Image: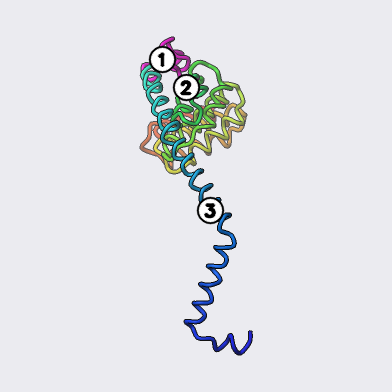
Amino acid sequence: MSKKNKHQDPEEQVENALNQTEHFIEKHKNTLIYTVIAVLAVTAIWFAYQQLYRKPLKEEALAQTFVAEQYFRADSFNLALNGDGNSLGFRQIMDEYGSAAAGSVYMYAGICELQLGNFEEAVKHLKKFRSKDPILQARAISNIGDAYAGLMNYKEALSFYLKAAAHSDNVFASTYLLKAGLMYEELGNKDSAIKTYEEIKVKYPQSLEGSEADKYIARIKQQ
């Protein structure tokens, strides 16, 4: 840097900087204008998509889900999943609305498939379910274990039961651990089964599973 620049007056530096900025803007004026227009256009398209298409689609999907949920609560799993001819079931809602449908649709559909014995379909839907609620998420993970148990894939079932029990500190962990213990037994791993039942006794003594853990332990030892 030259001595002249080192001792340049601050006001003069600011003026030079402004002149350079003005020169840059003048030189690239058209490019800058087109860029601003493009950004505004993209923003307008995104806003229109969200307000005029996405939002109404979500509302429509929610309305369709309401009827299916009523069937689900009445244990009418086939109607909840496949609809009644007038209202859509969870399966059609997922197909027609995709990501616009509420995330809970995957949970509902997965449980319906599970109850109807369609275990592979249950796994597919339940693995798509995501929730910030640790209890609901743990339940979905456990249901995946149930589906694998239905497929007699006891190793995978065990993995998901253990994962469900470890998912946060949820109130149904003792139930999931009991299922894990039963899977250990199916796999012939009696020692791990006993350890799991002992864990239930220590961690969840007030639970039903905790009060019955000795029964499972005694049954194994008597074999």
Mark closer to the chain start, 1 or 2:
1
Type of amino acid under label 1: Ser
Query: Does 6 sit above or below residue 43?
Result: below
Percent x, y of residue 199: 48, 40
Of the pair 190 and 49, the residue shown nearer to us: 49
Type of amino acid under label 3: Ile
Instruction: Please indicate, yes or no, whether residue 145 appears anywhere in the rendered image.
Output: yes
Residue 88, located in which quarter of the rendered image? Answer: top left
Return the residue found at the far top: 85
Q: What residue is shown with label 2?
A: 93
Q: What residue is shown with label 3?
A: 33
Q: Secondary structure at mark 3?
A: helix
Q: What separation in Å lies between label 1 and label 3 (alpha carbons)?
A: 50 Å
Badge 1: few (under 14), some or many (20 or more) residues near its Cα, within 10 Å? some
Q: What residue lies at 46% left-to-right and 13% top-to-bottom? A: 78
Could you say which disc has been placed on residue 87 in the image? 1
Badge 2: few (under 14), some or many (20 or more) residues near its Cα, within 10 Å? many
Q: What separation in Å lies between label 3 and label 2 (alpha carbons)?
A: 44 Å
Return the residue found at the far right: 1
Q: What residue lies at 60% left-to-right and 31% top-to-bottom? A: 156
Q: Secondary structure at mark 1?
A: loop
Q: What separation in Å lies between label 1 and label 2 (alpha carbons)?
A: 10 Å
Query: Does 184 sit above or below residue 81?
Result: below
Q: Secondary structure at mark 2?
A: helix
